[in-house]
Amino acid sequence: LQGGSGQGDQAPREVHVLVATRDLQAMSVLSQEDVVTRSLTGGVAPAESFQDPLQVIGKVLTSSLKAGAPFTSKSFVNDGSAARLAAALPEGRRAVTINLSDPLGSEYLLYPGCLVDVLATMRFMFGQVEQPVTVTLLQGISVLAVGSRTIVSVEPELAQPVQAPRDGARPAVTLLLDGRQAEALKLAMEEGRVSLVLRNPSDVARQAAAGTDLASLSTGISRA
């Protein structure tokens, strides 16, 4: 006689969890390359584990983690203080805060841990004529903070856009840069206007960007 369809006859259920792709040091800020989804047989995921990479990218580890180890809520810092944010900066990197002048208010699309490109619009001399030019100054830059919310903020859902304040004030945005990038950004802010554009957190490719002036812009419109 064959048995019924009890639990003993069911195939083990697979669950998916996020694990480290390599050995990670304490206070590391997680990037897309540090995270991979693995299947576990048995139907039981580790307590407080994660399934969506957006839940962990940009967060800071409290302690070192071995390759293949799952990420859990206990893997990350829960102190949102500025001192903790400073301690989370990788060696050789800097936290640079900027106030955007973009009239579109693009900072309200951003959230701590997201990736952005930095656009700079400045005026250059072409012969005897001064013209505005927009260039992609920096690509794939991590956002550490938007307003008072940081990558180490004590919040259950970090990847939520910042709400516009009622008083009309615009939140500052803090970026993770190296020394050279910080210098370039400072110069662009002094000599022109800077904007941030949101990009997919899994898109880490660098694209060639030659810049756009009025002549190339008008040519593109005429061909459209």
Image (cartoon, helix red, strand yellow):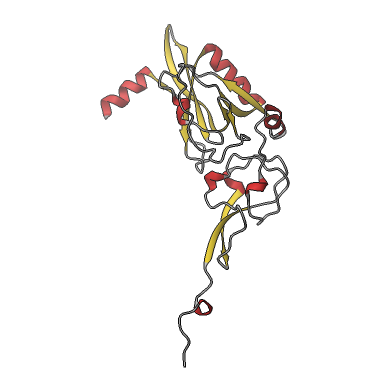
Q: Quadrant of residue 60?
A: top right
Q: Nearer the viewer, residue 138 or 216?
A: 138
Q: Position of residue 102 (x, y in %)?
A: 44, 19
212 is higher (above) or lower (below) than 35: above
Residue farthest bottom in this picture: 1
Q: Is 12 situated above or below 137?
A: below
User: Looking at the rendering, in which quadrant would you find the C terminus?
Assistant: top left
Q: Residue at the location (54% across, 16% down)? A: 189
Where residue 179 sits in the image (x, y, percent)? Answer: 67, 25
Q: How many marks?
A: 0
Residue 172 seen in render: yes
Q: Quadrant of residue 218?
A: top left
Q: Is residue 62 above or below residue 98?
A: below
Q: Is residue 152 above or below residue 132?
A: below
Nearer to the camera, 40 or 89: 40
Q: Residue furthest top?
A: 128
Task: Judge whether residue 210 can be spotted in this image.
Answer: no
Q: Relative to residue 127, is residue 147 drawn left or right?
A: right
Q: Give coordinates of residue 27: x percent, y percent.
A: 70, 39
Rendered image quadrant of residue 190: top right
For residue 140, side relative to residue 214 (left or right): right
Residue 87, percent from left and from top: 72, 32
